[in-house]
Image: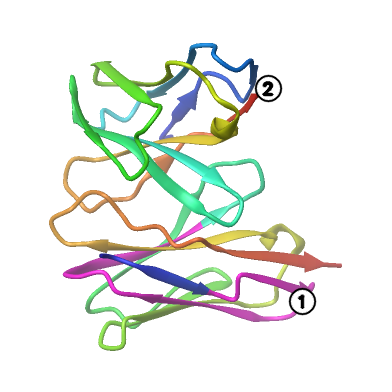
Amino acid sequence: KNQVEQSPQSLIILEGKNCTLQCNYTVSPFSNLRWYKQDTGRGPVSLTIMTFSENTKSNGRYTATLDADTKQSSLHITASQLSDSASYICVPQSGGSYIPTFGRGTSLIVHP
Amino acid sequence: DVKVTQSSRYLVKRTGEKVFLECVQDMDHENMFWYRQDPGLGLRLIYFSYDVKMKEKGDIPEGYSVSREKKERFSLILESASTNQTSMYLCASSPPTGPGELFFGEGSRLTVL
């Protein structure tokens, strides 16, 4: 069964600091992996997508990495802002299926 | 801009009532999904639909049914609401060429008393 483990479950950092969120998955066959950001009380929004051949991809202050061999991904946030406070959800997707597997998310709180 | 609209942001219902949650997308997407989200459990798939009048059970379909009479509209029905169905319900759509990005609505927070 496809599984996704995210760590840490929650994280509190000070504004301006960096942080890294981790994701381990067992989806097979692997097609791509997305990171979604979910603000409190809103629906998730895609931040970035990683395909099998990509190791690193940036979207502003967000940088995602992917190691398809070890089935690990990370999301690095640089110079955090208060608006980064949200849940970050790792979503690997199996090839041939349009139903993704959602991780439980990491809840990030950025304090001033 | 891509848009998925859920009819109600907040609902309060009584145990035993029939509840309809409506979702409309304007992207001409074939695939539509209903999830529920509870603290610590993440998003869990209730039902999905890959075409008009087509539906498939997700991981937790018990106590729910769905209707897709038109491509743009996907409804979630709670035939007899129970307190354990108090949750945030999220509708999403995605294009037919999978695996694609899911576009979510704002969510409907349902409280069953």
Q: Is residue B73 visible?
A: no
Task: Name the amino acid type tagged 1.
Answer: Gly
How far from the left and from the top, in percent, is residue A63?
Answer: 49, 76
Q: Secondary structure at mark 1?
A: loop
Quadrant in the picture for residue A82: bottom right
Task: Name the amino acid type tagged 2.
Answer: Leu
How far from the left and from the top, in percent, is residue B23?
Answer: 42, 23
Tell which subunit mark 1 falls on.
A
Q: Which residue is denoted by mark 2 in the rendering? A: B113
Q: Does residue B57 lie above or below A16 as drawn?
A: above
**Pointers 2 and 1 within a single chain:** no
Tell which subunit mark 2 falls on.
B
Q: Nearer the viewer, residue A67 or B77?
A: B77
Q: Is residue A32 magenta-colored? A: yes
Q: Is residue A106 visible?
A: yes
Q: Where the C terminus of chain B falls, by quadrant?
A: top right
Q: Is residue A94 left or right of residue A110?
A: left
Q: Which residue is denoted by mark 1 in the rendering? A: A16
Q: Where the N terminus of chain B falls, by quadrant?
A: top left
Q: Nearer the viewer, residue A69 or B110?
A: B110
